[in-house]
Amino acid sequence: MERLEIKSRKNKLYKEVEELSGQNLFGCYQCGTCSAGCPFIEDMDLTPDEVIRQVIMDNWEVLKSRTIWLCSSCYTCAERCPRDIDITKIMEALRQIILRLNIDKCDLSAIPMEKRKRIPQIAFVSAFRKNIG
Ligand code: SF4
Ligand code: SF4
């Protein structure tokens, strides 16, 4: 996410994420169960449990991670977490923080018309959902 300029802000990142997601990040004991079941783990640059750890450490650089956008909100991790942490909501909160910085991850107008015709409609729906989350 090269366009994203991250600066540490006054607020702690974990506080913003907790407020938006309603999840207790400090309940995570880093067991990795969420990552073990994630269907997109192979393409992620950080595993979901690593994302949580970075947020707790107040590392704003985590907002550059592809993982946040690759998450498909499938809820597998949320279903399996032994601490009942809804990681899906945490990913959504991180996307919201990025979008509130007025940064659009998906620039659909940049996709050539020819390619647009071949992209499944569900992919567009998914992209829009992430933009209005
Ligand atoms: S499954 Fe739950 S407790 Fe385990 S690492 Fe993931 S979020 Fe943390
Ligand atoms: S909700 Fe996101 S992070 Fe969790 S298993 Fe599904 S794709 Fe992976």
Image: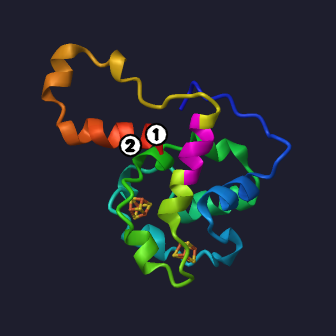
Q: Is mark 1 within 8 Å of ligand 2?
A: no
How many C-alpha atoms fall within 10 Å of the one at disc 2: few (<14), some, or many (≥20)? Answer: few
Q: Residue at coordinates 32% horizontally, 62% vertically from top-left?
A: 39
Is disc 2 in contact with disc 1, using a CB cutoff of under 8 Å? yes
Return the residue at label 1. Answer: 132
Q: Residue at coordinates 45% horizontally, 44% vertically from top-left?
A: 69
Return the residue at label 2. Answer: 129
Is residue 42 shown above or below 129?
Answer: below
Q: Is mark 2 within 8 Å of ligand 2?
A: no
Instruction: Evaluate whether residue 132 shows in this view.
Output: yes
Left or right: 66 with respect to 51? left
Q: Which residues are magenta?
A: 93-99
Q: Was residue 123 drawn as part of the magenta stretch in this picture? A: no
Q: Secondary structure at mark 1?
A: helix
Left or right: 54 with respect to 127? right
Q: Residue at coordinates 60% horizontally, 60% vertically from top-left?
A: 21
Q: Residue furthest right?
A: 10
Q: Position of residue 65 (x, y in %)?
A: 55, 44
Q: Residue furthest front?
A: 132
How many C-alpha atoms fall within 10 Å of the one at disc 1: few (<14), some, or many (≥20)? Answer: few
Is residue 125 shown above or below 76?
Answer: above
Q: Nearer the viewer, residue 69 or 131?
A: 131
Counting labels gives 2
Q: Amino acid at mark 2?
A: Arg
Q: Residue at coordinates 52% horizontally, 84% vertically from top-left?
A: 82
Q: Amino acid at mark 1?
A: Ile
Instruction: Evaluate whether residue 54 shows in this view.
Output: no
Q: What is the quadrant of residue 4 in the picture? A: top right
- Magenta stretch: helix, strand or loop mostly: helix
